[in-house]
Image (cartoon, rainbow, N blue to C red):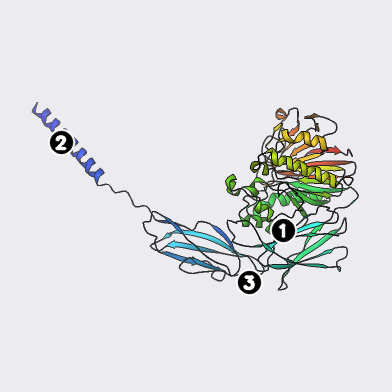
Amino acid sequence: MNRIRNILALTFTVLLLSVSCAVTSKSSYVPPKKNVTVSLGQSTLIMRPGESRTFNPTFKNAETPPELIWTSSDESVISISQDGTVIAHNDTSGSLSAQITAAIADNPNMRSVCTITVLSPSQVHFLTAGPGEDASTQAVISWHSVRPTSTLVYADTADPEDIKMLPLEGEPTSSEWADLSFIYRYKTVLSDLTPDSTYSYYILDEDGNTSEKSFFKTAGTDGTFSFAWLSDVHASTADSMKNTITLLDYMKARSDISFCLYTGDYVNQGQRYRYWESWTDSGLLSEMSYSFLIGNHEYYPNNTPESATPSYYLDFAAIPDNHGNSAPADYWFLYDNVLFICLDSMAADFAEGNRIRDRQLGLIKTAISEAWGDFTYIIVAQHYAFLDGDADGTGKYSYWYQAFDNVGIDLALSSDTHAYSRSKTLFNDHEDIFGTVYVTSPKTDGNELSEIVSDDEQLGIRSAFNSAATVTGGCYIDVTPEKMTLHLISKDGIEYDSVVIPARR
């Protein structure tokens, strides 16, 4: 019995000691101190030569700001002082880059890095030609430069000695860039051009520096031409342009492509200037003219409708200024025998829906009236999909189809869904011999499988082809006086769909 009492007493004592130790341990516990971290607020930045900027880093887990050590990977490009002020340097013909680092002095492993690109004083950015209102005799040229004055030099390649020089003054862009403080934008309309001709053009600055030579083609008058149609590349680097380059090469091998219609989302975020530079770096802009439409990625910085603005797009796009009282990104042009009407499908989100669509319908009627007798076909294009497979898409097919029936739209092109779909020829929302064909493009970027196959189970009363899944590819359209033929090809170069739209005028 005594032995049992002794065992119980010993056990009780151990328990008391355990509880005592636990309480003592808990009350004296001190959590580990968190490391102080530093952030420069951005990982990339674009600067002009001679520009200076002071960084104001932020800290976490710091009662007072710690001492920082500032360094530059190349002082000849970015010089830096220990108060975080950087100065950009570049006297070359191309952009230069360097990294700056802000490291915490007593813990150098805690650092923040920003890559700064310094523009060249002679470099031209996003030099683009777009069709003028009458693309047989007009073209719109647009570009950016750090210089306040520049000269546009152009000539018909059939008569290269007849050189035209047009001195121009730039205007500061109206956008608030996330990674660039200031740059000049140029835009001009060339008139009295020769139809069915190839023109060369380049930019000359006051120091005699010239940009690389670019080219565009004016529309002919015989009713025969071809154009590319692409969308949704979401460019952020030059590498993201690979599929676009590949698809255009396929198209040019099959047909004589005159220009490219691009229905939105050609950059990933409109407010980031370096994303637009992906197009400059790709070299694609120098080969032909582009009819760019606005997409939601150009419209909504960081996909936030609260800060939506078309200013980024308007600072770049080489488009005619003929929107009237419709949305500023709306425009139209006549290319040979086709009337193109390009709409801002996001504008309705900020203008009471159908109120802006009513104005856009007014623009369509104005364009038809002014171009009457000069066109065989009418193509309307916008970013948001008129039809999403067989259903009413975010582009509001339910609003547009009766209007399109009334004015005789032949082809309605849209994108945004990243899937390919094509409707039957629709009139009064039913299949008909004559009516409108609605096509939603695949996307240009991505690593999806190349094969583009229709999901027959998804076809309904409106659909003739619906890929259902996200696909990568593009289209080109051959035009003759008798018909338009749309071809769908994927990034493997195989044609997976085509449709003929006969002339009805």
**Kind of residue at badge 3:** Asp
Q: Position of residue 228 (x, y in %)?
A: 78, 48
Among numbered discs 1 and 2, the one appearing first in the sequence? 2
Residue under label 3, please give it.
Answer: 91
Q: CA distance from mark 1 to mark 2?
A: 83 Å
**Which disc number belongs to residue 13?**
2
Q: Is residue 402 visible?
A: yes
Dot 1 falls on a residue whose secondary structure is loop
State the residue at coordinates (72%, 70%). Answer: 205
Disc 2 is placed on an element classified as helix
Choose between 251 and 399: the one closer to the eye: 399
The residue sitting at 79% across, 32% down in the picture is: 424
Residue 274 horizontal/vertical position (percent): 62, 57
Question: Given the image, on which type of amino acid does mark 1 rest?
Answer: Gly
Q: Quadrant of residue 416?
A: top right
Tell me the quadrant of the picture where the N terminus can be found. Answer: top left
Between tags 1 and 2, which lies in front? Answer: 1
Determine crowd level at label 1: few under 14, some 14-19, many 20+ residues with C-alpha closer than 10 A.
some
- Left/right placement of residue 203 relative to residue 159 reads left
Q: Viewer-nearest of labels 1 and 3?
A: 3
Which circle marks residue 283 in the picture? 1
Mark 3 to mark 2 CA distance (whole Å) = 82 Å
Q: Which amino acid type is marked by label 2? A: Thr
The picture places residue 112, in percent across and down from the top left corner, at 48, 58
